Image: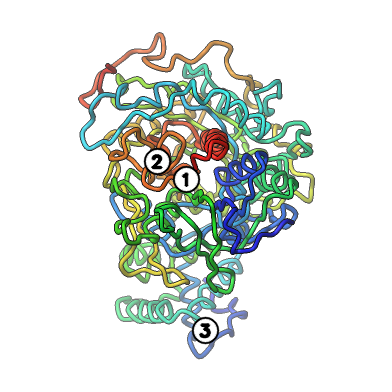
Amino acid sequence: MKTYETTDADVAVIIGSGPGGATLALRLVQQGLKVVLLEAGPYIPNEQFVNDERRAFNQLSWQDPRLATGSWSLAKDFPALPAWNGKVVGGTATFWTGLTPRFKAHEFKTRTQYGPISQASFADWPVELSELDSYYSAAETAMGVSHRGGRPPLPASNGYKVLANGAERIGYRHYSTGPYATNVEPYDGRPGTVQDGFAMAGDKGRSKWSPLVSEIPKALATGLMELRANSHAVQITLGAEGKADGVVYADEAGVLHRQRARMVAVAGNAIETPRLLLLSATSGHTDGLANSSGHVGRNYMRHTTGVVYAEFDHEVHMYRGEPMAGIIADESRHDPARGFAGGYYLELIAQGLPSFTTFMSPGAWGPDFTSKVEAYTRTAAMWICGEDVPQPTNRVTLSDSLKDSLGLPAPVVHYDDHPNDVAMRNHGYAQGEKLFKSVGALRTTRAPGMPSGHNLGTARMSTKPSEGVVNSFGQTHDVPNLFISDGSQFTTGAAANPTLTIMALSLRQGDYIGRQLATAAL
Amino acid sequence: MNTMASIKLQTRHPDLFSATHIAELVVLAKGLYPHEGLRDEPYQRAVAKVIDQAAIDAALWHLLRDGLRDLHLAASTPLLGMDPGAVNCLLHALDRTAFFESLRTLVLFHLYDDHEVWEFIGYPGSSFEHGGYLNRGFNDLDWLPEPRTAEAPEPLIEIGPIEGQPQKTNDLARTPR
């Protein structure tokens, strides 16, 4: 692997090796730039992943101290784990499942389309769907998404058969097993899925796309990128001209180093990205780096979610097969007649017994609960994934008491459900119950949201510098060579699972950075 | 209840928890997550893990000891030998105490990670070494018709109602434009 001196001021430093950071890294080295990719977690090859939910969680997850506050269910059910993020090379995508719907045109223009809604900070993106079309296609090709580019659909798993038949019976039309970023057939040097059911434990077989099996090895192969694992960024430093000139990070032993940089891109997920900007407060940026708007950390979104579980007379065995290869799009439309703005998807979800018992009914115990556990092999489930309302008070801040192992303030994630979120979730629960009952469900259970992998909006895009943190290319309004390269950029969250859009934005950002450097604008 | 008789494994940390304490925690664990036909051993293993954690977590140790002491003071009959209905009532009385919540969370966590429980419920665990389920029944459900896997041929209408379905309005709704 190519290595760079920490004093080399000619490298682009990218913080975070998940879909946003790794996609940008590959795009930059393809244009001849030198890149240092910092990752807080370790490098773990796929063969060391384990088919065991609890051990995999410990192996792959970000478990540094965090605190959830607010009226959302997470603050009660899992206060120390508001989100489920990766701390490993490949990031959260090492345990993502793989659904890749695109945003819809109107989801880039929510303020215009939805109209004024009390306490909501809906805003139009400074970019349109048509500007992203080619990048969406490129991202789908990079991931080998099913149902696209002539690639076949995933086959129907048991859980999908329940979901799809129920969908058909209640009048839905837009159900399918994808688009889903897991190989059905060999693609890009990776095999087809063996349907082992452990995508959320890391995917030993490499059939699932993640940066670990694609962008990172490809970028390393160019000889222009250094991957620096176990390197936890703690501050971005500014030079005399007000440009980012380095990143301070802690190594595995907690010793600090400073990598010089010609530009910096942050892709630490929508909790760690704003945290790093806030931790990087300095003279001229006393409220946090690139925070002249005051929007850093605000408008935190995590999708309106919930799970409906359904018991049947007959066996389902949800744990077999790709755990999320099923999606219903009929409710993803914007139809205010339903009583809420925005839309939601109904998505297949499958869990092993440890996760099922943890999330099916948080706090429950006794014979009613254990009777549901005993119905596990006869249970199917769906996940509601809808657009949540951006609110400036839903916010990532630095704790004034809780600290991480480096002694730095831990993030506090505050979230209150908006009435629109509640109305959407209840609609989703009711539709899910109706769907499952149409195919014979004996009993259904509504479960609240789980710690989310979808974390968005805390460094939002805006046309005006006063209304957001970055421009349409993810370039911060305040610091020209500082970029945000993850879901933090999202002005609004849309209903779609975000990874594909994060990748499309990184590809577009990479091209922009290339052009800017070519004209010496950066 | 033969909990006392079947306790033989927990000699760990006898200075911190007596055999009686451990047996009482097992009774509570079974009351929290009762499974008829499941042996006592998985509950004992779950409690052993709770105790292992309490041995390195002073706050948890304190909570468990005080919780058990309060139970002794409050209960008119001994916990050991109490019938399941009475244990259930006792647990309802404890619900939402810090002792109850800590014990419940930890028992849940460890009990449902026990491979004997997995087998009892029918969860096989790791599958990759068996070639996954590609040829072992990921799609063997036969009580419903085989559905389409491709997307619907017609495009989704992105704004507005599903055709043919009734509409109802709501105060929260906003008409676009």
- From the image, tell me which residue sits under label 1: A483
Q: What is the chain identity of the residue bearing mark 2?
A: A
Report the number of numbered marks: 3
Q: Position of residue A92 (x, y in %)?
A: 56, 49
Q: Are marks 2 and 3 on the same chain?
A: no
Report the amino acid beneath label 1.
Phe
Which marked residue is nearer to the observer: mark 2 or mark 3?
Answer: 2
CA–CA distance in space, label 2 to label 1: 8 Å
Report the amino acid beneath label 3.
Ala
CA–CA distance in space, label 2 to label 3: 62 Å
Residue A59: image tag: none
- From the image, tell me which residue sits under label 3: B19
**Image point 37% across, 42% down: which residue?**
A477
In which image quadrant can residue A118 be found?
top left
Foreground residue among A201 and B77: A201
The quadrant the N terminus of chain A occupies is bottom right
Q: Is residue A92 visible?
A: yes
Foreground residue among A344 and B82: A344
Q: Position of residue B60 (x, y in %)?
A: 42, 76
- Is A375 rendered above or below residue A167? below
Disc 1 crowd, CA 10 A, few/some/many (<14, 14-19, 20+):
many
Q: Are marks 2 and 1 on the same chain?
A: yes
Determine whether the residue tagged by mark 3 lies in a helix, strand or loop.
helix
Report the amino acid beneath label 2.
Val
Determine whether the residue tagged by mark 1 lies in a helix, strand or loop.
strand
Foreground residue among A245 and A65: A245
- Asked whether the beta carbons under mark 2 and mark 1 sit within 8 Å of each other, the answer is yes
- From the image, tell me which residue sits under label 2: A470
**Image point 47% across, 23% down: which residue?**
A129
Q: What is the chain identity of the residue bearing mark 1?
A: A
Q: Is residue A381 visible?
A: no
CA–CA distance in space, label 1 to label 3: 60 Å
